[in-house]
Image: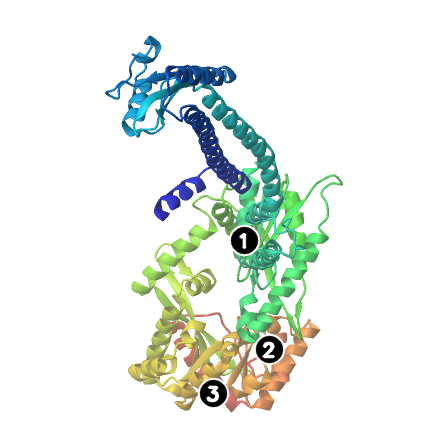
Amino acid sequence: MNLFYRRIIRRFDLLPMGLATRFTLFVALLLLSLTLVLVWIANTQAERWAQQSFTARAEHLYAVVNGISAERPSPQRMLDLQKVLDEVAALDQDTIYAFVTPLGPSGQPAFPDPETLSQDPAAGKALQTAIRRELPSMEAGEQILHIALPIYARGSEPVAVARMGLLKRGLVDAITASFNRNVAIAVIFMLFALPLTATTMRFVTAPISRMTQATKNVSEGNFEPPVDEARNDELGELSRSFQSMTRSLQESFEAVHRLTFTDPVSGLANREQMRRSLQSVVDRGAEAAFVIIELDRLHHVHRALGLDVGDDAVTTIADMLRDREHSLPKVSPDAARSVVLARIGEDRFGILIEGEWIQESVGREVMHFLDAFSGPVQVGAHAVTIKAHAGIAFVPTDGEDFSTVLRAASDGAMDARGAGDRLFGFGNRNMESYAFRRLIIEQEIRVGLEADQFEVFYQPQVDLRDGSMTGAEALVRWRHPQRGLVGPAEFIDIAEESGLLGELSTRVLRLVCKQGAVWAGRGMFPRLAVNISPSQSRHPEFAADTLAILDASGFAPQQLHIEITENTAMTEPRQTARQLAALRQAGVGIAIDDFGTGFSNLASLTAMPVDVLKIDRSFVAGCVRDGSARVVVAAIISLAKNLGFETVAEGIESVDQRDYLVQLGCTYGQGFLISRPITAMQFEEMYLEGSAATGVRQKAGGGWPAS
């Protein structure tokens, strides 16, 4: 039974209607069921009452008849009894017949029934029942209720039967009247009960309806639902709990939105948000310029000064771009502008400028942003010089999806960086793009490594005090089968980005050690400096591998100098110091290359096993005319002297530069004034000639040859 009710309730729950309607319908069905039961009970009671009424009349008639026939009735008494029955019949309009049927000696009627009664079996059945049982009998025909009452004299057997027929119409009318009355009461009750129930349910379920609407609002992103929290009942408690849950959902949604569409460091939009913004422009059929700003040396800040300072630099740059956005000049007074700023990479920022633009106007907009990097960027206590290049692509001209537009803008930025003298470039999607050329070069580098196409050139280094040749810096060149001799500026960056620079540096180190061993066999002992890539120096087996190469070649460790850049040394100073210490203990000299361009601190520098500081060519180039460069060069040389380091000046191109460096006490120098990078054979000839000339000058009292 419980399973049956559960199935009914489950099917009821599947009906497409609200809670109030369901409950009202449920109450209506319940009230209807109760009303039907009550009507049935009332009708049953009415029918029973009607039956009792007829039975009472029959008993009354029986008492009258028995009173008249106390003695054995004579014919006169039979007539008197008939008269009484006639009077009873006259008083009741429902009485059809009333007469006495005498019984013969056999106990059966002395006279046959009238034709009207003989056709109704119920009349004969009532008579025979009264005779046989000697008790009052009542049988219902189709329209008449037949009553038969046995009449006794002094004896124990009946002598006659008093008979009466009553129309059932009275009984039916009484029952019908009772039924109609009960139905009318039930209808009136339902008419009042159902609207009252519906109104009550609407009042009770109104908070639930509001909470349902609030739930839909929350699912649509509206976190201010119209929920009544002032109630003191269970619904009020539910509302307050729902409101608390909504606030938690809102906070979680905002946190997820921030993580999904906001860069956590800069606070700008991230790559995904930029993608959606650009797709929105395409979907609306609008036009926009998409700009990529690539920042050089920003990753050096992370490596040299740490992640915290690097993040501060990113935040500072983001603030600078926001300020530039707010001060962006209008193309015209009525021109509407929509700008989206985003950080789309470690050192890449994206700008989406919506509107109808021509290249010249976009160029002015981009230069407005690039001007922010015209001077040093102040990050805490550090003034960082950051160069920026930009690439510009147009939507939908250069693409209708984010990846295509991004690739076009990246091509423009790479072209600008490759050109050197341009700050921004315009992207394109043809197969001659800069990105495609870089991909081809990367593949050619791999082939070149396998085919031994890379050679070592040597740029001589001299003692600035007397001009004697002391050694050389090993520089790699690419002997390309189609393009001839290719300089490092065209492939070093690509080799580093593709992870091939470590292998290339190791190849150069082997070639230099092998050549140095050959020269040593010929009585030549130049000091050879080899540049080591950042990835190579960070390898845990770097020192062991270097010593193994020296041992295999037979080149003396004292004749080898390892050069690492300042930023490489400062990125992981402890690990770098351990690697370099092992080499220095074996006799290998250590030089810090491009000193003055990175972010060294004295504590890290003094902890490094360093022998030589190489002064960057940018400072040497301006040391004669630029006061700031003079100060930097003088400071580096003074620092090196105080720490016991030697100094090598790079990029000496004039006699004035050389003389100034000699005046400051710089130890060694290299540059075009002395010699361009040359082959091993040319270096050998120059070294031998320089040694002979140096011996002559030394006999003559030393000093540089006459210029």
Q: Disc 3 marks which amino acid? A: Gly
Disc on the earlier residue, 2 or 3: 2
Q: Residue furthest right?
A: 333
Q: Residue at image x 61%, y 81%?
A: 636
**Residue 482, located in which quarter of the rendered image?**
bottom left
Instruction: Answer left or right for 512 relative to 260.
Output: left
Disc on the earlier residue, 1 or 3: 1
Q: Residue at image x 74%, y 40%?
A: 332
Q: Which is closer to the viewer, label 1 or label 3? A: 1
Could you say where residue 559 lies in the image, as x and y percent from the top left?
Answer: 40, 85
Q: Disc 2 marks which amino acid? A: Arg
**Residue 613, located in which quarter of the rendered image?**
bottom right
Q: CA distance from mark 1 to mark 3?
A: 53 Å
The reply to whether dot 1 and dot 3 touch (C-beta < 8 Å) is: no
Q: Disc 1 marks which amino acid? A: Ala
Q: Dot 2: within a 10 Å radius of its alpha carbon, few (fewer than 14), some, or many (20 or more) residues? A: many
Q: Residue at image x 61%, y 51%?
A: 223
**How many marks can you see?**
3
Q: Which is closer to the viewer, label 1 or label 2? A: 1
Q: Which residue is mark 1?
A: 413
Q: Is residue 152 above or below residue 17?
A: above
Front residue of 274/107: it is 107
Q: Which residue is mark 3?
A: 695
Colour mode? rainbow
Q: CA distance from mark 2 to mark 3?
A: 21 Å
Could you say where residue 205 lies in the image, as x and y percent from the top left?
Answer: 58, 45
| Secondary structure under the numbered disc 3 in the rendered image | helix
Q: Is residue 214 above or below residue 386?
A: above
Could you say where residue 162 lies in the image, as x and y percent from the top left?
Answer: 38, 20
Q: Which residue is mark 2?
A: 658
